[in-house]
Image (spheres, rainbow, N blue to C red):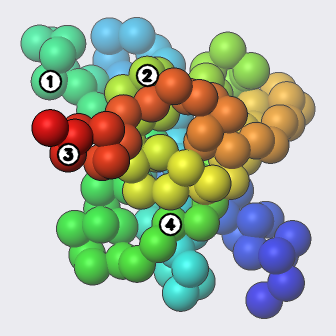
Amino acid sequence: MAERGRYTTLIEAAKKARSHAYSPYSGVKIGSAVLTAEGAIFSGANIENASYGLSVCAERMAIFKAISEGAGKIVAIAVVGKSEDFTKPCGACRQVMVEFNPKMKVLRRGVDGFSEDGSAEKLLPSHFNPEELSRK
């Protein structure tokens, strides 16, 4: 599948995942999907909890699903929300993205027509990395 077609499929998977968001407290619905080097797609939606700290973002949900299912390298992630403001991954999601691939392509889409592409390392240029953590 050509790269453009793969990204279209990835964005559609994120849009579909958004419909499964559970957000009774904020009303914010986010969908995400990741693409692996092998061509597999894993999706996730934000899931809120009355104890806010127990909530999980869509981006981490999709990444963790992929990794827990044995996926290889993640090459791209799509994040779909209402608008530009609701497609900005939080700091925790950004750190998780760079953990699994700093060069990961990040496709942000708003249902209002917003569209922006970038990379995980651009979203979080000064991130923790294994090399720094293993220094003595």
Instruction: Give the mark, 1 or 3, whose residue is nearer the N terminus.
Output: 1
Distance of label 1 from label 3 (alpha carbons):
29 Å
Q: Is residue 42 above or below residue 95?
A: below
| Relative to 64, residue 9 above or below | below
The answer to whether 1 appears left or right of 28 in the picture is right
Q: Which residue is mark 2?
A: 91
Question: Where's residue 100, x and y in %?
Answer: 41, 56
Residue 2 placed where, x, y %? 85, 84
Which is closer to the viewer, label 2 or label 1? Answer: 2
What residue is pinned by disc 3?
134
Q: Is residue 85 visible?
A: yes
Residue identifier under label 1: 54
Q: Whole-percent x and y of residue 99? A: 39, 49
Find residue 82 and report its horizontal and vertical position in percent: 68, 25
* Residue contact at pointers 2 and 3, CB within 8 angstroms: no
Q: Residues within 10 Å of mark 3 (few under 14, many from 20)?
A: few
Q: Residue at x 63, y 54 (%)?
A: 103
